[in-house]
Image (cartoon, rainbow, N blue to C red):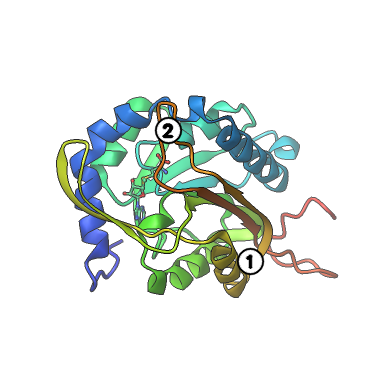
Amino acid sequence: MTTPDPAGFLHTTRTSYDAIAEGYASWTRDELAAKPLERGLLTAFAELVARVARVAKDGGGGLPLADVGCGTGRVTGFLHGLGLGLDVFGIDLAPQMLAEARKDHPGLRFDEGSMLALDLPDASLGGLLAWYSTIHVPDEELPRVFAEFRRVLAPGGYVQLGFQVGDEPLRLTEALGQEISLVFHRRQPERVAELLRDAGLEVVSRVWRERETDGPFPERAPQGFVLARRPVVSGGCEDGDISTTD
Ligand SMILES: C[S@@+](CC[C@H](N)C(=O)[O-])C[C@H]1O[C@@H](n2cnc3c(N)ncnc32)[C@H](O)[C@@H]1O
Protein backbone atom coordinates (compact mmCIF):
# COMPACT_ATOMS: atom_id res chain seq x y z
CA MET A 1 0.00 0.00 0.00
CA THR A 2 1.42 3.44 -0.90
CA THR A 3 0.83 6.21 1.63
CA PRO A 4 0.38 9.74 0.19
CA ASP A 5 3.40 11.81 1.20
CA PRO A 6 2.78 15.44 0.17
CA ALA A 7 5.23 16.83 2.74
CA GLY A 8 7.91 14.37 1.63
CA PHE A 9 8.91 13.23 5.13
CA LEU A 10 8.21 9.56 4.40
CA HIS A 11 10.48 9.70 1.37
CA THR A 12 13.39 11.36 3.19
CA THR A 13 13.00 9.05 6.21
CA ARG A 14 12.96 5.96 3.98
CA THR A 15 15.97 6.96 1.87
CA SER A 16 17.95 8.05 4.94
CA TYR A 17 17.42 4.73 6.75
CA ASP A 18 18.11 2.79 3.56
CA ALA A 19 21.49 4.58 3.36
CA ILE A 20 22.51 3.73 6.93
CA ALA A 21 20.84 0.30 7.26
CA GLU A 22 23.99 -1.82 7.40
CA GLY A 23 25.79 0.50 9.83
CA TYR A 24 22.66 0.84 11.99
CA ALA A 25 22.37 -2.95 12.25
CA SER A 26 25.91 -3.40 13.55
CA TRP A 27 25.81 -0.28 15.76
CA THR A 28 22.59 -1.24 17.58
CA ARG A 29 22.82 -5.05 17.60
CA ASP A 30 24.01 -5.17 21.24
CA GLU A 31 22.27 -2.04 22.52
CA LEU A 32 19.47 -3.76 24.44
CA ALA A 33 22.02 -5.96 26.21
CA ALA A 34 23.48 -2.74 27.66
CA LYS A 35 20.08 -1.33 28.72
CA PRO A 36 18.37 -3.27 31.54
CA LEU A 37 15.66 -0.65 32.07
CA GLU A 38 14.55 -0.91 28.44
CA ARG A 39 14.62 -4.70 28.59
CA GLY A 40 12.43 -4.51 31.69
CA LEU A 41 9.89 -2.21 30.01
CA LEU A 42 9.75 -4.34 26.89
CA THR A 43 9.39 -7.54 28.90
CA ALA A 44 6.53 -6.08 30.96
CA PHE A 45 4.82 -4.94 27.76
CA ALA A 46 5.26 -8.39 26.19
CA GLU A 47 3.80 -10.10 29.27
CA LEU A 48 0.75 -7.83 29.18
CA VAL A 49 0.26 -8.52 25.48
CA ALA A 50 0.65 -12.27 26.01
CA ARG A 51 -2.08 -12.14 28.67
CA VAL A 52 -4.58 -10.22 26.58
CA ALA A 53 -3.75 -12.15 23.43
CA ARG A 54 -4.66 -15.36 25.30
CA VAL A 55 -1.43 -17.00 24.17
CA ALA A 56 -1.42 -19.40 27.10
CA LYS A 57 -5.08 -20.41 26.82
CA ASP A 58 -4.96 -21.10 23.10
CA GLY A 59 -1.57 -22.73 23.32
CA GLY A 60 -0.80 -20.87 20.10
CA GLY A 61 0.41 -17.43 19.12
CA GLY A 62 -2.88 -15.68 19.89
CA LEU A 63 -3.42 -12.21 18.44
CA PRO A 64 -0.14 -10.93 16.96
CA LEU A 65 2.17 -8.21 18.21
CA ALA A 66 3.42 -5.81 15.52
CA ASP A 67 6.76 -4.01 15.91
CA VAL A 68 5.95 -0.91 13.84
CA GLY A 69 9.07 0.85 12.62
CA CYS A 70 11.02 -2.30 13.49
CA GLY A 71 14.13 -1.19 11.61
CA THR A 72 16.69 -3.99 11.64
CA GLY A 73 14.46 -6.13 13.85
CA ARG A 74 16.61 -6.12 16.99
CA VAL A 75 13.59 -5.51 19.28
CA THR A 76 11.32 -7.83 17.25
CA GLY A 77 13.94 -10.53 17.87
CA PHE A 78 14.16 -9.65 21.57
CA LEU A 79 10.36 -9.94 22.00
CA HIS A 80 10.28 -13.24 20.15
CA GLY A 81 13.21 -14.55 22.20
CA LEU A 82 11.37 -13.96 25.49
CA GLY A 83 9.72 -17.33 24.94
CA LEU A 84 6.21 -16.10 25.77
CA GLY A 85 4.82 -17.67 22.61
CA LEU A 86 4.03 -14.29 21.07
CA ASP A 87 3.36 -14.11 17.34
CA VAL A 88 5.67 -11.13 16.70
CA PHE A 89 6.29 -9.53 13.32
CA GLY A 90 7.88 -6.31 12.09
CA ILE A 91 6.76 -3.51 9.77
CA ASP A 92 9.02 -0.76 8.44
CA LEU A 93 9.15 1.93 5.82
CA ALA A 94 12.72 1.27 4.66
CA PRO A 95 13.43 -1.79 2.48
CA GLN A 96 17.13 -1.91 3.37
CA MET A 97 16.36 -1.90 7.10
CA LEU A 98 13.99 -4.81 6.44
CA ALA A 99 16.70 -6.63 4.48
CA GLU A 100 18.98 -6.38 7.55
CA ALA A 101 16.12 -7.57 9.78
CA ARG A 102 15.51 -10.63 7.59
CA LYS A 103 19.26 -11.41 7.61
CA ASP A 104 19.50 -11.18 11.42
CA HIS A 105 16.16 -12.93 12.13
CA PRO A 106 15.47 -15.34 9.28
CA GLY A 107 12.63 -17.06 11.17
CA LEU A 108 10.57 -13.89 11.67
CA ARG A 109 8.22 -12.03 9.34
CA PHE A 110 9.03 -8.47 8.25
CA ASP A 111 6.69 -6.44 6.01
CA GLU A 112 7.14 -3.09 4.27
CA GLY A 113 4.57 -0.48 5.28
CA SER A 114 3.89 2.86 6.88
CA MET A 115 2.37 3.56 10.28
CA LEU A 116 0.22 6.28 8.72
CA ALA A 117 -1.86 3.64 6.91
CA LEU A 118 -1.21 0.16 8.27
CA ASP A 119 -2.16 -2.67 5.96
CA LEU A 120 -3.84 -4.53 8.84
CA PRO A 121 -7.51 -5.29 9.61
CA ASP A 122 -9.36 -3.48 12.39
CA ALA A 123 -8.90 -4.93 15.91
CA SER A 124 -6.39 -7.51 14.68
CA LEU A 125 -3.46 -6.96 17.09
CA GLY A 126 -2.93 -7.89 20.73
CA GLY A 127 -0.05 -5.42 20.91
CA LEU A 128 1.78 -2.75 18.94
CA LEU A 129 5.28 -1.51 19.64
CA ALA A 130 6.52 1.78 18.20
CA TRP A 131 10.07 1.87 19.55
CA TYR A 132 11.78 5.07 18.41
CA SER A 133 9.76 5.14 15.20
CA THR A 134 7.05 7.79 15.82
CA ILE A 135 10.06 10.11 16.32
CA HIS A 136 10.14 10.67 12.55
CA VAL A 137 6.46 11.62 12.29
CA PRO A 138 5.76 15.38 12.39
CA ASP A 139 3.43 16.66 15.13
CA GLU A 140 0.59 17.38 12.72
CA GLU A 141 0.51 13.73 11.55
CA LEU A 142 0.72 12.14 15.02
CA PRO A 143 -3.07 12.15 15.70
CA ARG A 144 -3.53 10.21 12.48
CA VAL A 145 -0.89 7.66 13.51
CA PHE A 146 -2.42 7.18 16.97
CA ALA A 147 -5.90 6.78 15.44
CA GLU A 148 -4.40 4.11 13.22
CA PHE A 149 -2.84 2.37 16.24
CA ARG A 150 -6.22 2.35 17.99
CA ARG A 151 -7.93 0.99 14.88
CA VAL A 152 -5.65 -2.04 14.54
CA LEU A 153 -5.55 -2.89 18.26
CA ALA A 154 -8.17 -5.28 19.58
CA PRO A 155 -10.04 -4.04 22.68
CA GLY A 156 -7.70 -4.58 25.64
CA GLY A 157 -4.63 -4.59 23.35
CA TYR A 158 -1.54 -2.58 24.35
CA VAL A 159 0.65 -0.05 22.59
CA GLN A 160 4.15 0.79 23.85
CA LEU A 161 6.07 3.82 22.61
CA GLY A 162 9.73 4.77 23.09
CA PHE A 163 11.11 8.19 22.09
CA GLN A 164 13.59 10.95 22.92
CA VAL A 165 12.30 13.62 25.32
CA GLY A 166 12.56 17.31 24.47
CA ASP A 167 10.83 20.30 22.96
CA GLU A 168 12.86 20.95 19.83
CA PRO A 169 13.50 18.57 16.93
CA LEU A 170 17.00 17.38 16.10
CA ARG A 171 17.93 17.51 12.42
CA LEU A 172 20.76 15.34 11.14
CA THR A 173 22.37 15.57 7.73
CA GLU A 174 25.08 12.98 8.40
CA ALA A 175 25.12 9.68 10.32
CA LEU A 176 27.28 6.56 10.26
CA GLY A 177 29.36 8.04 7.45
CA GLN A 178 26.36 8.63 5.17
CA GLU A 179 24.57 11.78 3.99
CA ILE A 180 21.02 11.72 5.31
CA SER A 181 18.10 14.03 6.00
CA LEU A 182 16.40 12.96 9.20
CA VAL A 183 14.29 14.88 11.69
CA PHE A 184 13.99 13.45 15.21
CA HIS A 185 10.85 14.87 16.84
CA ARG A 186 11.53 14.99 20.56
CA ARG A 187 8.44 15.13 22.75
CA GLN A 188 7.31 15.34 26.34
CA PRO A 189 5.72 12.12 27.70
CA GLU A 190 2.75 14.18 29.02
CA ARG A 191 2.04 15.49 25.51
CA VAL A 192 2.32 12.02 23.97
CA ALA A 193 -0.06 10.66 26.65
CA GLU A 194 -2.54 13.45 25.90
CA LEU A 195 -2.52 12.65 22.17
CA LEU A 196 -2.99 8.94 22.88
CA ARG A 197 -6.01 9.78 25.07
CA ASP A 198 -7.38 12.02 22.31
CA ALA A 199 -7.15 9.00 19.99
CA GLY A 200 -9.32 6.97 22.36
CA LEU A 201 -6.60 5.01 24.17
CA GLU A 202 -6.19 4.64 27.96
CA VAL A 203 -2.76 5.61 29.28
CA VAL A 204 -1.32 2.95 31.61
CA SER A 205 2.14 4.34 32.37
CA ARG A 206 4.52 7.16 31.54
CA VAL A 207 8.23 6.72 32.18
CA TRP A 208 10.87 9.40 31.89
CA ARG A 209 14.52 8.67 32.40
CA GLU A 210 17.71 10.72 32.42
CA ARG A 211 19.98 10.52 29.44
CA GLU A 212 22.98 8.22 29.64
CA THR A 213 26.19 10.06 28.88
CA ASP A 214 28.71 7.27 29.33
CA GLY A 215 28.85 3.65 28.23
CA PRO A 216 28.79 2.35 24.67
CA PHE A 217 25.55 4.20 23.70
CA PRO A 218 25.76 7.81 24.94
CA GLU A 219 22.52 9.73 24.41
CA ARG A 220 21.76 13.32 23.40
CA ALA A 221 18.46 13.54 25.33
CA PRO A 222 16.41 11.98 28.15
CA GLN A 223 14.19 9.09 27.07
CA GLY A 224 10.42 8.65 27.34
CA PHE A 225 8.23 5.55 27.32
CA VAL A 226 4.44 5.56 27.29
CA LEU A 227 2.24 2.48 27.58
CA ALA A 228 -1.45 2.67 26.66
CA ARG A 229 -4.23 0.30 25.76
CA ARG A 230 -7.41 0.25 23.77
CA PRO A 231 -10.25 0.27 26.29
CA VAL A 232 -12.48 -2.71 26.78
CA VAL A 233 -16.11 -1.60 26.80
CA SER A 234 -17.19 -1.95 30.42
CA GLY A 235 -20.42 -3.64 31.39
CA GLY A 236 -20.69 -5.38 28.05
CA CYS A 237 -18.77 -7.45 25.61
CA GLU A 238 -17.41 -5.56 22.62
CA ASP A 239 -16.94 -7.62 19.47
CA GLY A 240 -13.48 -9.18 19.52
CA ASP A 241 -13.11 -8.46 23.24
CA ILE A 242 -9.85 -9.98 24.42
CA SER A 243 -9.95 -8.80 28.02
CA THR A 244 -8.67 -11.22 30.65
CA THR A 245 -11.08 -9.81 33.21
CA ASP A 246 -14.19 -11.67 32.10
C1 LIG B 1 15.42 4.96 15.02
S1 LIG B 1 14.89 3.66 13.98
C2 LIG B 1 14.27 2.49 15.19
C3 LIG B 1 14.23 1.09 14.67
C4 LIG B 1 13.88 0.02 15.71
N1 LIG B 1 12.58 0.25 16.29
C5 LIG B 1 14.95 0.00 16.79
O1 LIG B 1 14.66 0.34 17.93
O2 LIG B 1 16.08 -0.35 16.45
C6 LIG B 1 13.39 4.28 13.26
C7 LIG B 1 12.76 3.30 12.28
O3 LIG B 1 11.41 3.73 12.05
C8 LIG B 1 11.11 3.56 10.68
N2 LIG B 1 10.02 4.49 10.34
C9 LIG B 1 10.03 5.84 10.39
N3 LIG B 1 8.85 6.34 10.00
C10 LIG B 1 8.05 5.28 9.72
C11 LIG B 1 6.71 5.14 9.26
N4 LIG B 1 5.97 6.22 8.98
N5 LIG B 1 6.21 3.90 9.12
C12 LIG B 1 6.97 2.80 9.36
N6 LIG B 1 8.26 2.87 9.77
C13 LIG B 1 8.80 4.08 9.95
C14 LIG B 1 12.42 3.89 9.98
O4 LIG B 1 12.45 3.39 8.66
C15 LIG B 1 13.42 3.24 10.92
O5 LIG B 1 13.69 1.91 10.56
Q: Is mark 2 within 8 Å of ligand 1?
A: yes
The residue under the point 31% across, 52% down is 93
The quarter of the displayed image where residue 174 is located: top left
Circle 2: element type: helix
Quarter containing the N terminus: bottom left
Q: Which residue is mark 2?
A: 74
Of 71 and 180, nearer the camera is 180
**The disc labelled 2 sits on which kind of residue?**
Arg
Amino acid on which the number 1 mark rests in the picture: Leu
What's the residue at 71%, 48% (across, down)?
Answer: 52
Q: How many marks?
A: 2
> Can you tell which quarter of the image residue 43 is in?
top right
Q: Quote the CA–CA distance across marks 2 and 1.
A: 27 Å
Q: Is residue 40 above or below residue 67?
A: above
Element type at marker 1?
loop
**Disc ID at residue 201:** 1
Q: Is residue 14 visible?
A: yes
Q: Position of residue 139 (x, y in %)?
A: 41, 70
Specify whether 121 is left or right of 159: left
The image shows residue 16, relative to residue 229, as above or below, that is above
| Residue 24 at x, y percent in the picture | 29, 35
